[in-house]
Image: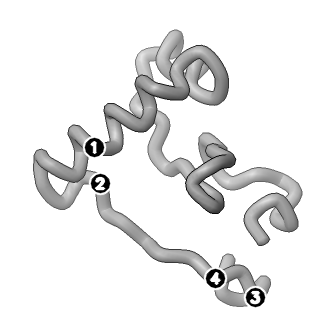
């Protein structure tokens, strides 16, 4: 879907190994009070998520795909 929309991305499987999953959890916990608050409250991990330019974090695919450009 993203490729069809012309959005460049890198896919990282955070469940591939424990080190990647821990790195993801650190990212998630650092943004817990903002983007992940409802996700964590509901007992979910927050996968998938999208990190754009190491600045903007989205839990799930945003409705407005232009946010990922």
Real-space Cα separation, disc 2 to disc 4, in angstroms: 19 Å
Q: Mark 4 points at which residue?
A: 8
Circle 3 packing at 10 Å, graded few (<14), some (14-19), many (20+), is few
Q: Which residue is drawn at 76% across and 51% down?
A: 62
Real-space Cα separation, disc 4 to disc 1, in angstroms: 22 Å
* Left or right position of 12 against 30: left
**Figure quadrant of residue 27:** top left
Circle 4 packing at 10 Å, graded few (<14), some (14-19), many (20+), is few
Real-space Cα separation, disc 2 to disc 1, in angstroms: 8 Å
Give x and y (percent) for residue 35.
64, 29
Real-space Cα separation, disc 2 to disc 3, in angstroms: 24 Å
At mark 1, the secondary structure is: helix
At mark 3, the secondary structure is: loop
Q: Residue at x 54, y 27 (%)?
A: 31
Q: Which residue is drawn at 18% across and 60% down?
A: 16
Q: Are marks 4 and 3 in contact (CB under 8 Å)?
A: yes
Residue 53 position (above or below residue 58): below
Q: Residue 6 carries which label?
A: 3
Q: Are marks 2 and 4 in contact (CB under 8 Å)?
A: no
At mark 2, the secondary structure is: loop
Give x and y (percent) for residue 34.
65, 22
Camera-near label (2 vs 1) is 1
Q: Which of 8 and 53 is in front in this view?
A: 53
Q: Are marks 2 and 1 in contact (CB under 8 Å)?
A: yes
Q: Residue 23 carries which label?
A: 1
Q: Which of 23 and 49 is in front in this view?
A: 23
Q: Mark 2 points at which residue?
A: 14
Real-space Cα separation, disc 4 to disc 3, in angstroms: 6 Å
Q: Earlier in the sequence, mark 4 or mark 1?
A: 4
């Amino acid at each position: 879907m993203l490729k069809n929309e012309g959005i460049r991305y890198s896919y990282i499987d955070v469940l591939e190994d424990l080190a990647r999953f821990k790195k993801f959890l650190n990212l998630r916990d650092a943004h817990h009070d903002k983007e992940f608050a409802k996700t964590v409250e509901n007992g979910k991990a927050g996968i998938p998520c999208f990190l754009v330019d190491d600045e903007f974090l989205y839990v799930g695919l945003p409705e407005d795909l232009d946010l990922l450009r």
